[in-house]
Amino acid sequence: MQIHSSSEVEHYWRKYLDTLNPKDPVPKSHEVWYFGDTEKLANELAELVKTGQKTATNALVWEEEAKGERPARVGDVVVVTD
């Protein structure tokens, strides 16, 4: 599934929320991003996520702090685009 616009991401997010069990915690927010620094790499890594081969990622804490971003936490939800 290719996701390109913010309305497509929002639709995808709503569909995900509809799949949650009423007893599950509902994520308050989500991020939207892609892997890598080229379209080819983004597509390859997104495919690995889709097939279940890629189940985790990481980043350098100091790099995120330098950008003013909050480091990822367990339970964060991300919509990965291609």
Image (cartoon, grey):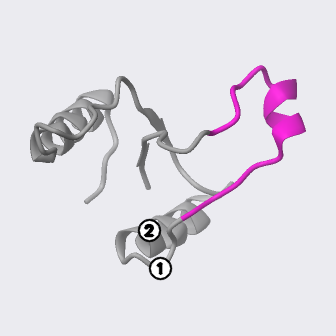
> Quarter holding the N terminus?
bottom left
Residue 75 is left or right of residue 67, and the answer is: left
Part of the protein shown in magenta = 56-72
Quarter location, residue 42 = bottom right
Determine crowd level at label 2: few under 14, some 14-19, many 20+ residues with C-alpha closer than 10 A.
some
- The residue to which callout 2 is attached is 49
| Quarter that holds the C terminus | bottom left
- Percent position of residue 69, x then y: 71, 25
Query: What residue is shown with label 1?
Result: 53
Please tell me whether the stretch drawn in magenta is mainly helix, strand or loop: loop
Secondary element under disc 2, as helix, strand or loop, is helix
Alpha carbons under labels 2 and 1: distance apart: 6 Å
70 displayed left or right of 29: right
The answer to whether residue 59 is magenta is: yes
Asked if 29 appears above or below 12 in the picture, the reply is: above
Q: Is residue 33 left or right of residue 19?
A: right
Residue drawn 79% across the image and 33% down it: 64
Residue 33 is left or right of residue 21, and the answer is right
Farthest residue in the front direction? 23
Q: What residue type is labelled 1?
A: Gln
Q: Where is residue 79 in the image (x, y as percent from the top left)?
A: 39, 44
- Kindly check if marks 2 and 1 are in contact, taking CB atoms under 8 A apart as contact: yes
Q: Is residue 74 magenta?
A: no
Label 1 SS: loop
Image coordinates of residue 18 in percent, x first then y, are 10, 40
Q: What residue type is labelled 2?
A: Val
Residue situated in front as seen by the camera: 68 or 25: 25
